[in-house]
Amino acid sequence: MLNHTESLAEKFIRKGFWLYLFSFLVGPLGYIVKIILSADLTVEEIGLLYGILSLIGLLAVYHDLGLTESLNFFLPKFIVKKDWTRFKSLVAYSLGAQVITSTLIGLILFFSSGYLAEHYFRSTEAVEVIQIFCLFFFGINIHNMNTTIFWVSQNTKLQKGTEFLRMLFVMFFTLGLYFLDIGNLITYTWTWIGGVAIGIGFGTYFMYRSYYIPYLRDAEIIYDKELIRKVVKYALWVVLAANVGGVLGQVDMQLIIYLLGTKDAGYYTNYLSIIGIPFIIITPIIGFLFPVISELHGKEDEGKIAIIKTLFYKYFAIIGAFTGMFMFVFGPEIAQILFGAKFAISGVILQYSAFFIVLNFLLQINFQILAGVGRIHERVKILAIGLVINIILNLILIHYYGVYGSALAVGLSWIPIWYLSDRKTRMYSHGFDFVFFLKNLTLIGVIGVLSWYYLTPLFIGTLRVQWLLLLVGIAFLTVLPFVALNLKEGKLFLGELKKMRKWG
């Protein structure tokens, strides 16, 4: 499953190609779906639909008692040892737990849909939407089992390809309803079920053909008490981390729904879509750190982990700072280009958290390292502290600033999470190049000020398509100075890649 003849650089380059190819294909599909929904549904309906999806995301952390993420840590080690018996056994344990817990949680959600609709979402339409999403909850967990195995074996083509097919059909179904003029809150909800069914079908086929037949068909499923003990111990920390992390990621949306209502939730969910755009680019390569670092840790090759963190910190700090500046300056314009004038407020919300994006980029790197070296308990503690701070800030700032305060609260909560996670991974670092960072930060500040005063007025009185072309042109022109400034650094980075090619 793992190609042990590949160098680390070849892993990042070849597998990174598939990560980015499918990320650039999948990302726009999700935005096309949301653009259509934003045009065809009211702000309140958008808030209700994605608010329920957010609730499903909160419940999803319990669907397998932490065993699926445990696969990320243990399976690469079994692949290295070609221990297909324990590999198959662990997958069977996780699948069994997932089916049982997903069914139980889905049934509870189904039978409590009336109560949630009346007392939480305060919408009669919420009953049927919640019940439909019970099927989605069960299906997406099975789909994620397939993609997790593709991921831990570093088969980025299958992992991202299967997710691409799922989202492609969600988009097809959504477009069909829109052009047939039969789209409404309920029918659009069913498109998510159709997409996940397609994802399960293709994922299961690829799993059977590429994994089960060549590797697992002749392996036994055994009762290994020691393996179960290790996995359960790790999984308990995963559940705690996922619980805290899941709440941290969704608490703002749930507080907005409960305290402010579905209309503000509608604005907020489209803000989340905008702030998620840069993560389409950076999440695949940062997420790929987990299996790579897990493999290096299994080989006790800590020095290479430090090289990876140092390089990623150096360049992603600049990417994050530039992204934050661009989103702060052009936030309202981006929102109107994507979702129309009625969602301009989503872009204003973005401005309250844009400058904190760089910290999120860096803390993602830290968390992948902590997970890859098995220090999952450290992530739990850090996320718990961040969750408490986030909830307190949300309650205070929502009271004073409404929906804008929630975005500010989330951004502020990233500060302690980044700081604590950086401290816990500092041994995996060769330092930080402050000269390089400050040089680029100065350029970012100059471009930001010039853009604010001279470029944003260009968007007045033009059409959305013209705005889009103008924004793309501005983005291209603002990147050019960074390319010119960092030509020497680019050559040094290529030199580091050449050194990494020698790593086995």
Image (spheres, rainbow, N blue to C red):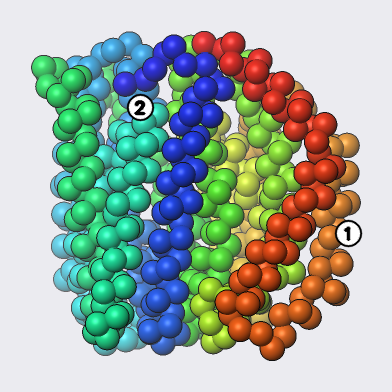
Label 2 packing within 10 angstroms: few (<14), some (14-19), many (20+): many
Disc nearest the viewer among 2 and 1: 1
Q: Quick one: label 2 or label 1, which is nearer the N terminus?
A: 2
**Residue type pointed to by label 2:** Ser
Q: Is residue 388 visible?
A: no
Residue 420: image location, x then y, percent: 66, 41
Which residue occupies 55% across, 52% down?
279
Instruction: State which quarter of the image contains the N terminus.
Output: top left
Residue at left offset 26%, top offset 41%: 145
Residue 322, disc = none
As rendered, which of 294 and 383 lies closer to the eye?
294
Q: Position of residue 418 (x, y in %)?
A: 66, 45
- Identity, as a three-letter code, of the amino acid under mark 1: Val
Residue on which disc 2 sits: 153
Residue 54, above or below 347:
above
Nearer to the camera, 464 or 423:
464
Residue ID at (65%, 64%): 472
Q: Picture quarter containing residue 54?
A: bottom left
Q: How many marks?
A: 2
Res. 446 mark: 1
The x, y position of residue 137, in whole percent, is 25, 58
Distance in Å between CA atoms under marks 2 and 1: 44 Å
The residue closer to the viewer here, 33 or 113, is 33
Q: Vertical placement of 264 versus 159: above or below?
A: below
- Using the image, determine if residue 250 lies above or below residue 72: below
Q: Are marks 2 and 1 in contact (CB under 8 Å)?
A: no
Q: Is residue 63 left or right of residue 362?
A: left
Does residue 446 appear left or right of residue 19 in this picture? right
Is residue 178 among what the camera can see? yes
Q: Nearer the viewer, residue 453 or 126?
A: 453
Residue name at image x 88 percent, y 51 percent: 442
